Amino acid sequence: MLPASPAPAAIISQLPLDVVGGGERFTLQAHRSALACGDVVDLWCAAAGNPPMEPHARRMDHAYHRLAHGGGTPVPIETVPLRELLRRQAAYETVVVHQHLVNASTLDMLSAAPPTQRMILTSLGAEPIGELFAKAYEPHSGLEIVEISAYAASRATSRGMPATSLSAGVWRSDIAAPIARPPAAPLRTVAIGRLLPHKAFEIAIDAVAGIDSAATLTIIGPSSGDTAYEQHLATLAARTVNCRVAGFLDDAARTETLTQADVLLANSAHVTYTGKRLDQPELLGLVILEAIANGVLPICSDIPSFREICEALGIERWLYPERDSAALRELVRAAAELAPEARRRIVRTAAERLENMYLWDDYWVRLTRRGIAPAHLARAA
Amino acid sequence: MKLLFVSNLFPPHVVGGYEMGCQMHARAAARAGHDVLVATSMSFGSLVKQSASPGVAVRPIFEPVFDYEFGDRNYQRPLTYAGPGGIHPGNCLALAELIHTWRPDAIWMHNPLGLGPVGILETAASSGVPTVVHLMDFLDEGIRLSQHGFELAGRWAAAKARVHAIACSTRTLEENSRLGRYASAIVVPGGIETDAIPCRDDGPRPDFPSHGPVRMVSFGQLKSHKGVQHVVAALGILRRWMRLDVELHLIGSCEAEFERELMAIATSLGCASAIHAHGRKGRDELHRLLATMHLAVLPLNEREAFGYVAPEAALHGMCVAIGGNAGCTEVFPENYPYLLAARDDPAVIAATVRRIIVNGDERRHWERALPAIVAERCDLDGVVMPRCLDFIAGIAARARTPTIAPEVALERTLATWQMNRNLSRLLGDDGPAPEDKQRRLGRRLNRALRRAVPAGLQYRFKTLAMRLRRLRAA
């Protein structure tokens, strides 16, 4: 039996939400945004990392959690197989699928959508079924792909899946006026992210190590399980006097460290330290938005998604060519030489723009209240 | 009103009561002065042929996607495996086009299984035309069991919530609420054209003979799920142990294999000579035969949404021993004594038949009472159709403009079907596993033979074969 009165909308994450990376954080914030906007929205996620392309019968047995989530850590309150989730899914007015390129069951969800239902897909980076999805996808008026950046949308569109974009990264209440810090030497830099090769933390170490006493670097981020890379970073940092890998910090400690810093270094690159090439290292750059919100100047590698944010916030001068540690070193030096007030002014201006474009507070409204295409409205009339 | 009927099959091609019920409703609606058009499928396989429907326009616009001859085993064509429980795009388009051009005031849907029922119901629900599903089978169960390579039960439920239902029994409505409820629903028992029954008003039939056999009849589809084998076994008990002179008349279509099974049972119980197989009869001939019978035994099972045969027998003024959980029992009074507590127990059937034969006063009471009781609830033109048409007129008056344009809804239905097909193809997961070659070859040969030999001739052969076997056994 279907539940008597399901919530009018649901967010379904195709990845578990028990580990918090950028994508998972985006999903939880999107759900929190819905709550803040006053909507009742069920939050579902895959109970485990399911194999991406299993036969139909096995896909139907994949387990999904319904989560209780009041803004903190989500807690599973119910577990059902995909077959049951698909039955219930049809009763929602709107269904938002996050990480839709993670599992072929996204296409089951699209197939299980009644014609009256609105489906919104957001990929968030992980794309094991990207190619399969592009082949199987059939656009229609009840289905939208809304990516988290114009760059991500352009990637989807180039694969034959027309997409729009809608970004968010910070809450209004999290935006702090830049604090007047006493001039300090050395310059405190911080790099944040899961310890993954495409984050290119080694470029930051190389750049800051070359400055020596003019700056320090703290690398914060949970382990990714890539021990070779983590050891590589540890070795590089051990050779320096001004760089250290702090590893995982909880949210409060992470934010505290960020607010104590002068500059954030965001170094993601298409090529890793082993020479492996990635199609896309980042789809958005939440950490840049968080830095601005905390009054910290970001210096970013010039990858498309970072450029998009930096241009939108008016800080494109602080972009450097990806994997170019010499160029990064120059920008760090330039930041160190900036008067504190000048740095604060840059960040304050960026924060004003941030408030107009990247707030979670109205993200859900912006996402779901967007009108249906005028052509369809006309035909309905 | 302009009433568009939708049914997978429609006479002359029938499987059972659902198609005949649809035909009766369509004819009665036409008699009541409504403009009637029936959208159905082309025939597929050598189905039983019934008389056509004068006065009713029929358009076979749907692709026949489900071969009833071979039931669930028929998933031959990759485009149509979704027929029993999914979406068939061509049928959605055909229905949408017909609605657009004919502009009905209401859609009166009967059996959509086999047409890609989810797509058909969504197309009707999105058309803006008030839609009623006439429930004479357990559609939800059919849908649930047919989710192979897709999972559309939720969509079925969502579409149901936008349409209305007329159920032939309370239990049928309950069974059809398992995957979600209809927007509104009423229970109206299956309608019977009572005028076609010759002896309805003739009062109780003559008393049972003091000498000579009691003529017991079982009619309709003679299949194992109808419990005919239990009736044959009960005949053996009646004759051998209860020492009652009873003969069993079987009227209806019967598969050869099942016929052999029946005769094997009868031979083992020494009652083969008391069985008279009449084969399938037309309606008039059936009624003439029924008028000569003394009692009916119809151990219908709980899967029987209604079961026209029992009220038809009752209208003939016969006492009927009925399976106690069939939908049609709802038209019989609560104190009706001949409901079978265990329809698959020959001893229970035999005891009930003995009670009918031996207890003359009780039998005569019910022989007199039943025709009026059943007619009061099942008379098609006098009771059933007015109730159905009132309900349909009521929902038509409350109809609202759909929130999305029908063509937009159709576009979405077709796109989702396409995505499912693409996924199945890309993952090599194309519906249920195909049967082994040998079985497929056997089915093809069987079908070829059935197509080559006219159905009437087949039944003559079958009847002849049955008689020969009976002679041999004797």
Image: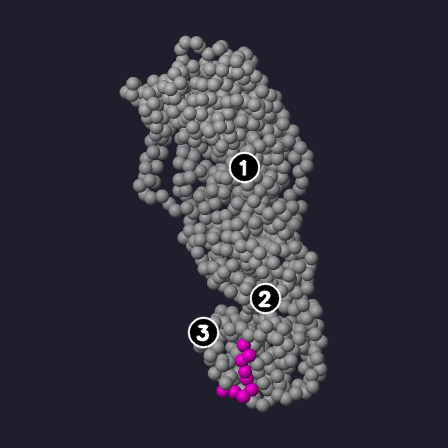
Amino acid type, callout 1: Glu
Q: Nearer the viewer, mark 2 or mark 3?
A: 2
Q: Looking at the image, is A362 positioned above or below residue B62?
A: below
Specify whether disc 1 shares its chain with disc 3.
no
Spatial separation of the CA atoms under disc 2 and disc 3: 26 Å
Check residue B324 for magenta coloring: no
Answer whether labels 2 and 3 touch (C-beta < 8 Å).
Answer: no
Whether residue A103 appears in this view of the structure is yes
Label 1 residue SS: helix
Q: Which residue is mark 3?
A: A276
* Mark 1 nearby-residue class (10 Å; few <14, some 14–19, many ≥20): some
Amino acid type, callout 3: Lys
Spatial separation of the CA atoms under disc 1 and disc 3: 58 Å
Specify whether disc 2 shares its chain with disc 3.
yes
* Mark 2 nearby-residue class (10 Å; few <14, some 14–19, many ≥20): some
Report the side of A304 relative to A313 (left or right).
Answer: left
Q: Which residues are magenta?
A: A239-247
In percent of width and height, residue B24 lies at 54, 25
Q: Which residue is mark 1?
A: B175
Who's the residue at 50% across and 39% down the image? B141
Spatial separation of the CA atoms under disc 2 and disc 1: 44 Å
Q: Quadrant of the N terminus of chain A?
A: top right
Query: Looking at the image, which is closer to me, A323 or B383?
Result: B383
Answer whether labels 2 and 1 touch (C-beta < 8 Å).
Answer: no
Q: Quadrant of residue A327?
A: bottom right
Amino acid type, callout 2: Arg
Q: Looking at the image, is A46 positioned above or below residue B122?
A: below
Q: Nearer the viewer, mark 2 or mark 1?
A: 1
Q: Which residue is mark 2?
A: A25
Tell me the chain of label 2. Answer: A
Who's the residue at 45% across and 52% down the image? A56
